[in-house]
Image: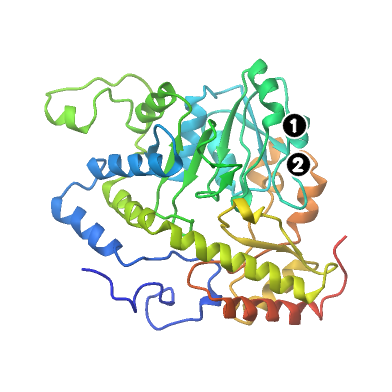
Amino acid sequence: MTATPAAVGASTTASGAGTAPAVSRNARPHLHGTELDALHAVLADGVFGHGPRTERFERELARFLGVADVVAVATGTAALHLALLAAGVGPGDEVVVPSQTFCATVQAVLATGAHPRFAEIDPDTLCVTAATVRAALGPRTRAVVPVLYGGRAVDLADLHELFDRRGITVVEDAAHAFGSHHGDRRVGGTGLLTCFSFDPVKNLTCGEGGAVVPRTPEDARRVRRLRGLAIDADHRDRARSTGYTVTGFGMRAHLPALNAALGLAQLAGFDLVADRRDRLWRAYRDRLGELALPDRVRLVDLDIDHTVPFHCVVRVPDRDRVFHCLQARGIGVGVHYPPNHLQPAFADWHTPLPVTEATGVEILSLPLHPALTVDDVDTVVTALHDVLRTTSGALP
């Protein structure tokens, strides 16, 4: 069942028929060639749900991150939801969160019954800072969710004493940041309650999946109870018993063995993916620098020496026109993300965020995934340069 080398990393159309240039995809999963064997083994043994492979994946993640425990869950959104619940967030509370994030971050807050308090971002990194988080705190703030945009770590150390005094928990949205470092430790290994996503296009994929890195054994127990419908016995104990006890609220948010098997195969080859992403981002930085167009294109800073980049984002004038022109040329650009405080679903918590609003109409994600080559980077940057030459205006 091992995939042939030609199949691994090949560019295919959405239907799976024929081929398309790698630059036509903004993001795509990378296969190492061992995934089919891993999935076949799960199908053969007939244990598809939570089981030994899920627990092995948790142990391997913990070893990789240098932590005592990791709790695998169904999705990155579920990870945020469960981590917030484990931190005691609930109705009547408020959670500080940037507007510049995927809407799942905000939906996870609402799922607890709490409400968001939107925070401003730094225009160079598109991440919150200690100053913007402090400005967003309110009397009912129970948690702060910094989003590690693009994979870059966020340092809120200056606020930790204040958070401790006020009983505020930091829940990191590290959906983009698997493999990145904060100083000399990996993101997830710094003692914070950290949430990862392993969806189809993340640095490491389980097809769908996520994980919570708990601060304490009690955090781990809470998240495991919540993800398993609050049943007080694990799958092994239930198989040996005629009953079980449901101890409170819970949900079905476990990571199935099929997804865990895919994640294990991906984790074994992660260094290759991390290296390719690093080299491609640096190639974009260097090639964009050669254009000498600082008034037309600005690269969002990822602190690349500490980051496994999830995407490569630039700010450009007349973004919507540039977006459509590049797509018409077969370049798979994207926008990550439309600001949430301007979304109708979150209108009740709108607050003016001038930097988020200004950068939100400028950001453009260039293709970044392991199937790309440095020549592909040249193709993308050349096309961007050609389109920008016909663009009026400049960045403020």
Identify the disc placed on residue 231: none
Which residue occupies the extreme top position in the image? Answer: 165
Q: Nearer the viewer, residue 317 or 284?
A: 284
| Amino acid on which disc 1 is placed | Ala
- Expressed as whole percent of the image width and height from the top left, the position of residue 40 reads 20, 60
State the residue at coordinates (42%, 21%).
218
Q: Nearer the viewer, residue 354 or 367?
A: 367
Using residue 22 as the reference point, say whether residue 54 is left or right of it. left
Identify the disc placed on residue 120: 2
Which residue occupies the extreme front position in the image? Answer: 184
- Expressed as whole percent of the image width and height from the top left, the position of residue 159 reads 70, 27
Identify the disc placed on residue 136: 1
Q: Nearer the viewer, residue 348 or 240?
A: 240
Q: Quadrant of residue 31?
A: bottom left
Q: What is the spatial separation of the Cα atoms under label 2 and label 1, in whole angstroms?
A: 8 Å
- Does residue 18 lie above or below 203 as drawn? below
Asked whether the viewer can see residue 207, the reply is no
Secondary element at tag 1: helix
- Expressed as whole percent of the image width and height from the top left, the position of residue 375 reads 58, 80
Q: Quadrant of the C terminus?
A: bottom right
Q: Quadrant of the N terminus?
A: bottom left
Using residue 350 as the reference point, say whether residue 105 is left or right of it. left
State the residue at coordinates (53%, 47%).
175
State the residue at coordinates (50%, 37%).
189
Q: Assess whether mark 1 and mark 2 are in contact (beta carbons under 8 angstroms).
A: yes
